[in-house]
């Protein structure tokens, strides 16, 4: 049997976000020893915010051997409560205790930085297989020679070119790699404006101690979603119940009025309070506790499905190819799954002539699935944000019927969606289907035109 190529192939990863870190770590676990990660920022510097750690994500973190780094921060959720924004009426309460039983892992939430740090610690443990290059922006791709052009923040000039055997574009929703890939086919890169924006807020325990009702939310094991016309808020405790994480979604006004290149900005607290002025008193008190200059606003953007994620020896992963609205809590999880699957597929390479076919196998394993989840997240947002009173009433009745076995309009707590997402082990799936998909790719390549 031919020897695997993993010890010799040079992998360049563009971006040290969730997908880039996961891919680097998973590749190192599969025996790759020449992995270079190029990150435009000077450090990891993740924006403070909560993140849902669903069973499909915990499973991969455990497999990657980094669960211990996150365990202390993660909080297990026992319930999910959906409430009417103005009255605080509980429309549905879903008991999440079935999650651990059914999918082998409980539903957890954690600090985004803790998740990124867990992956980063794993990468450092894998040294010297992985080398990080910070303040290094990829500004060009040579698809024929599989080279990337890198510009360092503190160096003048056009930057230098680096050769690699495989290039992975893990550079997020504003991906330069995607843009270059589309350009060689004469296509415009057009990230879509969803017209929505999100405030991300974190309240510390000491900010809540004087309000018994809010303190009870922090000490609970529940997520809370308050829904209203065109807006909603989701909140849950993270970091061992020391922080109450709040994330909103509302029509974008600020970015539309003053476009910025970054899609994140410090937001005005007064404006935020005005947007949620018709929400119930508990929500308004919660938002009023926010420190003046600690409101962060994100513009929510997506991208139309791409024809392909692969060009030659170059592939996209994570938000670069399937940016997902946050309503399903799966964007980072899917990005990390991409990295895990890439490592399985590339770990089987024994001939450099099969690199392209292997990357196509990765695309087959991931594209349809992640694009379905992108559509589910968008559908969930539409249902949560209904503005027509009759449609709202029908949806709210559907929420009440969940207790009697009806489908849940909030898709992340819908049993059928959970079965599809949480019950899935992307690595097992890749191992199972690799042979069939690889043969199909090779057959497609070898067939005469
Ligand atoms: C408001 C909000 C809430 C969310 N909540 C959740 C949640 O609860 N659960 C969940 O699973 N997901 C959530 N997501 C989605 C999740 O954050 C993303 O899906 C995930 O971060 C995608 O990871 P990524 O690695 O593909 O991209 P990113 O995390 O964006 O990382 C891309 C990296 O590439 C770097 N980069 C960019 N361009 C270049 C370049 N040219 N050269 C070098 N480096 C470059 C960037 O600096 C960055 O570090 C949320 C998203 C938003 C906006």
Image: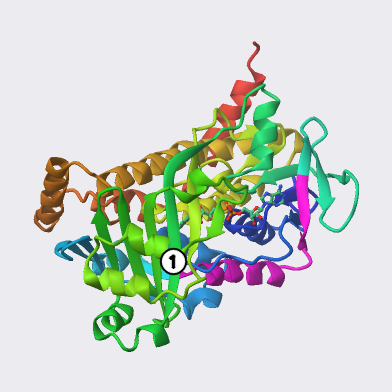
Left or right, 349 with reference to 249: right
Is there any visible trace of residue 389 in the rendered image?
yes
The residue lying at 89 percent from left, 46 percent from top is 160
Q: Whereabouts is ligand 1, in terms of quadrant?
A: bottom right
Front residue (pair 414, 83):
83
The local crowd at label 1, few if under 14, some if 14 to 19, many if 20 or more residues have their Cα within 10 Å, is some
The residue lying at 71 percent from left, 50 percent from top is 13
Front residue (pair 332, 442):
332
Front residue (pair 301, 282):
282
Q: Which residue, as the protein is rendered here, is positioned at the far top?
A: 449
Q: Is residue 234 above or below residue 314?
A: below
Q: Is residue 213 above or below residue 428?
A: below
- Residues rendered magenta in the picture: 110-138
Coordinates of residue 322 in the picture (x, y in percent) = 51, 42
Question: In which quadrant of the rendered view does residue 206 lie?
Answer: bottom left
Coordinates of residue 132 in the picture (x, y in percent) = 76, 62
Q: Quadrant of the C terminus?
A: top right
Q: Is residue 238 above or below residue 337?
A: below
Left or right, 70 with reference to 316: left
Is there any visible trace of residue 76 in the rendered image?
no
Q: Which residue is mark 1?
A: 269
Left or right, 106 with reference to 311: left
The residue lying at 68 percent from left, 45 percent from top is 168
Front residue (pair 17, 436):
17
Coordinates of residue 316 in the picture (x, y in percent) = 62, 41
């Amino acid at each position: 049997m031919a020897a695997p190529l993993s010890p010799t192939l040079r992998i360049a990863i563009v971006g040290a976000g969730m997908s880039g870190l996961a891919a680097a770590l998973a590749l190192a676990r599969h025996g790759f020893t020449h992995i270079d990660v190029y990150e435009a920022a000077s450090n990891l510097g993740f924006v403070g915010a909560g993140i849902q750690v669903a069973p499909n994500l915990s499973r991969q973190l455990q497999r990657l051997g980094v669960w211990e780094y996150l365990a202390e921060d993660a909080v297990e959720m026992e319930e999910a409560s959906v409430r009417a924004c103005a009255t605080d009426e509980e429309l549905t309460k879903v008991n999440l205790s079935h999650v651990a039983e059914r999918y082998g892992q409980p539903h957890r939430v954690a600090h985004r930085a803790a998740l990124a740090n867990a992956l980063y610690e794993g990468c450092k443990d894998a040294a010297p297989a992985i080398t990080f290059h910070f303040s290094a922006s990829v500004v060009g791709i040579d698809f024929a020679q599989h080279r990337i052009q890198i510009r360092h923040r503190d160096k003048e000039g056009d930057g230098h070119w680096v050769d690699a055997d495989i290039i992975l574009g893990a550079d997020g929703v504003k991906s330069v790699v995607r843009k270059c890939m589309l350009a060689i086919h004469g296509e415009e890169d057009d990230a879509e404006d969803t017209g929505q924006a999100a405030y991300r807020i974190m309240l510390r325990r000491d900010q809540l101690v004087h309000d018994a009702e809010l303190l009870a939310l922090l000490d609970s094991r529940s997520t809370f979603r308050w829904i209203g016309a065109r807006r909603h808020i989701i909140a849950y405790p993270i970091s061992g119940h020391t922080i109450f994480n709040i994330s909103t979604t509302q029509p974008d006004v600020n970015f539309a009025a003053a476009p910025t290149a970054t899609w994140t900005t410090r937001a005005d607290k007064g404006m935020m309070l005005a947007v949620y002025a018709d929400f119930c008193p508990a929500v308004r008190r919660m938002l009023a506790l926010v420190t003046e200059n600690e409101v962060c606003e994100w513009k929510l953007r997506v991208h139309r499905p791409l024809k392909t994620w692969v060009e030659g020896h170059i592939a996209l992963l994570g938000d670069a190819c399937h940016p997902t609205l946050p309503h399903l809590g799966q964007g980072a999880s899917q990005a990390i799954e991409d990295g895990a699957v890439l490592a399985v597929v590339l770990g089987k390479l024994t001939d450099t002539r099969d690199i392209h076919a292997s990357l196509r196998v990765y695309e087959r394993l991931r594209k349809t699935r992640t694009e379905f989840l992108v559509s589910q997240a968008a559908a969930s947002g539409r249902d949560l944000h209904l503005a027509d009173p009759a449609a709202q009433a029908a949806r709210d009745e559907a929420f009440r019927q969940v207790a009697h076995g009806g489908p849940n309009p909030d898709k992340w707590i819908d049993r059928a969606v959970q079965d599809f997402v949480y019950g899935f082990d992307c690595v097992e799936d890749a191992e199972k289907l690799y042979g069939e998909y690889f043969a199909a790719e090779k057959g497609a390549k070898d067939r005469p035109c």
